[in-house]
Image (cartoon, grey):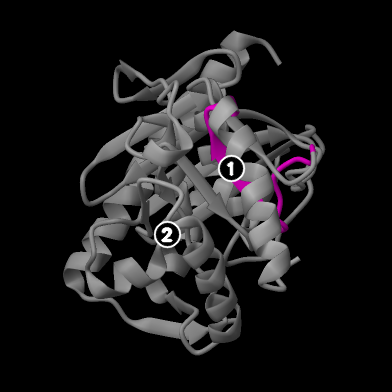
Amino acid sequence: MTIAANTDLLELARRIALEAAELAARRRAEGVEVAATKSSIVDVVTLADREVEAFVRQAISEARPDDGFLGEESTGSSGTSGLTWIVDPIDGTVNYLYGIPQYAVSIAVVEGEADPTSWNALAGCVVNPASVEIFTATQGGGARLGAQQLQVNSDVSLEQALLGTGFSYSAETRVRQGQVLAGIVGQVRDIRRAGSAALDLCAVAAGRLDAYAERGLNPWDHAAGALIVREAGGSVRGFDGARESVDFLLAGEAPLADRLEPILRELYVSAGLI
């Protein structure tokens, strides 16, 4: 795809994401109702999650009927164009449920199927409806917060690194993740857990975090955010040269990620997470 084509895709993603964010914020103001639970009793989906995703899916279908689609709350579909839209209607649903203003609409479009180990991300947009911050990126076109060009923090030592992370919905897994944090927290500046992977990745791109690491992320959690980090000059990876996936994601400036990766890998092994 050309840079011009990627820009057109981004404009569509941005327009739909802003409209979806307005809908999510409106539903939050009206009051949030849990529709169901998924992997555990604390892994909730709200009626707004479903409504926002349905809105996004319909808007994309009307604009680009030949593209594929993968969203968190509905069945995925393949297209004939070679492009797939990866959508999280409300990333940070528990924050949304509690009224914590740290949730996001995340929309990305990729070449290929909905597999982060093989796709080629072309454009992405992450919108925080509460703050109305708009993070965007296109492949080869850089990353922005509004009109501001983004750049990851550089030359950060391990000891001065502010590290973001997240936790599983499984209580047993969270205990093991706590063991990992106990092993790393004394080696870095501090740890942050804000509750939205999409926004945490954007925080790395914007220099609000130095790095971010998490295991268990789904494609829709990081599709747009990972592109935004890369276009802000950062590295996004899995373990041992692999692409980011449900197995592991680490984002930050490459030299810092190089230092963090072996430490985190050893801690994950010790905790029985890999």
Question: Does residue 262 belong to the magenta stretch?
Answer: no
Given residues 77 and 242, the one toward you in this image is: 242
How far apart are the alpha carbons under marks 2 and 1? Answer: 29 Å
Question: Marks 2 and 1: CB-CB under 8 Å?
Answer: no
Residue located at (35% from left, 42% from top) = 127
Which residue is rendered at x = 57% and y = 81% of the image?
170
Query: Which of 111/182 is in front?
Result: 182
Image height of 3 relative to 70, above or below: above
Q: Residues within 10 Å of mark 1 (few under 14, many from 20)?
A: many
- Point out residue 206 in the picture as x, y percentages from the top left corner: 36, 30
Please check the rendered image and state whether residue 245 is part of the magenta-colored stretch, yes or no.
Answer: yes
The picture quadrant where one finds residue 194 is: bottom left
**Position above or below: 235 against 239:** above
Q: Residues within 10 Å of mark 2 (few under 14, many from 20)?
A: many
Can residue 254 be seen here?
A: yes
Residue drawn at x 42%, y 33% is 14
In which image quadrant can residue 168 be found?
bottom right
Q: Which residue is mark 1?
A: 260
Q: Residue 120: horizontal and vertical position, in percent?
A: 73, 30
Instruction: Specify whether 210 is left or right of 80.
Output: left
Q: Amino acid at mark 1?
A: Leu
- Main structural element of the magenta stretch: helix, strand or loop? loop
Where residue 156 appears, x then y in whole percent? 43, 28
Write down the quadrant of residue 267 in the picture.
Answer: bottom right
- Which residue is most to the bottom? 41
Query: Which disc number belongs to residue 90?
Result: 2
Q: Residue furthest left?
A: 29
Kind of residue indicated by mark 2:
Ile
**In the displayed structure image, the side of residue 1 where residue 213 appears, left or right:** left
**135 relative to 139 in the view: left or right:** left
In the picture, measured across the screen, residue 19 lies left or right of residue 39, that is left
Tell me the magenta residue range.
241-254
